[in-house]
């Protein structure tokens, strides 16, 4: 009899942990990314030249934006899941403000209040909810044009061959020994931000091997 009760108790305990481990499972980066991709495809389907890129390098590889949507602008989407801390966010804000034309951060209820107070007011805010096993995307604030875009940082997105193509297109004199830093400086001194942004977007849309 005691043996039977012990077995029943063990069953109930294991069932309790199985249920709660599933119920309390934290939403991960991959879960949010899986939601965002189709959402962003629908949101940008009227722009036929749109490309969506995961993990776009910024500032010569010092940072990466989780998802970049590239059409008439470069719009970066940063993901902060329940498993993430916000420790890297101050540096990320600095890098993203230099490099991206618009920025949106997607997160959940555990982070939303802190993030709302922390990020610039022109950043967009997306809330990811998970209620009754139904995940939803709620756009709390639309992103506005980033006023801090930096020409040199924008050009740091490009590879050397892409920088050379831009300099050739606008007849910018460069040395054959010029490194990427000198190339960027020469181009930034000759072209304004609107032209630079257009050339960076064009180069990214034409890029073939993204991890070269």
Image (cartoon, rainbow, N blue to C red):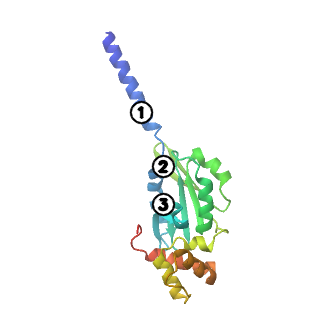
Which residue reaches farthest front? 177
Task: Say what secondary structure mark 3 lies in.
Answer: helix
Dot label at residue 135: 2
The residue that label 1 is drawn on is 19
Q: How much space separates mark 2 and mark 3, taking CA atoms?
A: 12 Å
Q: Earlier in the sequence, mark 1 or mark 2?
A: 1
Q: Nearer the viewer, residue 159 or 145?
A: 159
Q: How much space separates mark 1 and mark 2, taking CA atoms?
A: 19 Å
- Looking at the image, how many numbered discs can be counted on the residues? 3
Task: Say what secondary structure mark 2 lies in.
Answer: strand
The reply to whether residue 140 is in sight is: no
Characterize the local packing of mark 3: few (<14), some (14-19) or many (20 or more) Cα atoms within 10 angstroms: few
- Say above or below: 33 vs 172: above
- Tell me the residue at 60%/73% (across/down): 152
The residue that label 3 is drawn on is 39
Residue 186 lies in what quarter of the image?
A: bottom right
Q: Where is residue 2 in the image (x, y as percent from the top left)?
A: 33, 10
Q: Which of 133 and 16 is in front in this view?
A: 16
- Say above or below: 197 vs 120: below
Q: Position of residue 173 (x, y in %)?
A: 56, 88
Q: Do the residues labelled 2 and 3 touch (CB within 8 Å)?
A: no
The reply to whether residue 201 is in sight is: yes
159 left or right, relative to 208: right
On-image quarter of the C terminus: bottom left
Q: Nearer the viewer, residue 171 or 204?
A: 171
- Say above or below: 140 vs 163: above
Q: Position of residue 82 (x, y in %)?
A: 52, 45
Q: Which of marks 2 and 3 is nearer the N terminus?
A: 3
Dot label at residue 91: none
Which residue reaches farthest bottom? 171
Characterize the local packing of mark 1: few (<14), some (14-19) or many (20 or more) Cα atoms within 10 angstroms: few
């Amino acid at each position: 009899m005691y043996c039977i009760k012990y077995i029943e108790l063990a069953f109930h305990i294991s069932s309790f942990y199985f249920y709660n481990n599933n119920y309390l499972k934290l939403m991960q980066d991959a879960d949010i990314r899986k939601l965002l991709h189709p959402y962003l495809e629908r949101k940008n389907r009227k722009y036929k030249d749109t490309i969506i890129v995961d993990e776009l390098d910024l500032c010569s590889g010092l940072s990466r934006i989780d998802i970049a949507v590239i059409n008439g602008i470069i719009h970066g989407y940063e993901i902060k899941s329940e498993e993430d801390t916000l420790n890297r966010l101050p540096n990320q804000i600095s890098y993203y403000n230099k490099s991206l034309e618009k920025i949106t951060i997607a997160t959940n209820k555990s982070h939303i209040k802190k993030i709302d107070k922390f990020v610039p007011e022109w950043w967009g805010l997306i809330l990811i909810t998970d209620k009754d096993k139904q995940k939803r995307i709620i756009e709390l604030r639309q992103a506005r044009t980033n006023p801090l875009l930096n020409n040199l940082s924008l050009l740091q997105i490009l590879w050397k061959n892409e920088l050379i193509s831009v300099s050739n297109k606008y007849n910018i004199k460069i040395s054959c020994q010029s490194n990427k830093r000198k190339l960027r400086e020469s181009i930034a001194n000759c072209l304004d931000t609107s032209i630079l942004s257009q050339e960076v977007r064009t180069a990214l849309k034409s890029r073939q091997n993204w991890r070269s």
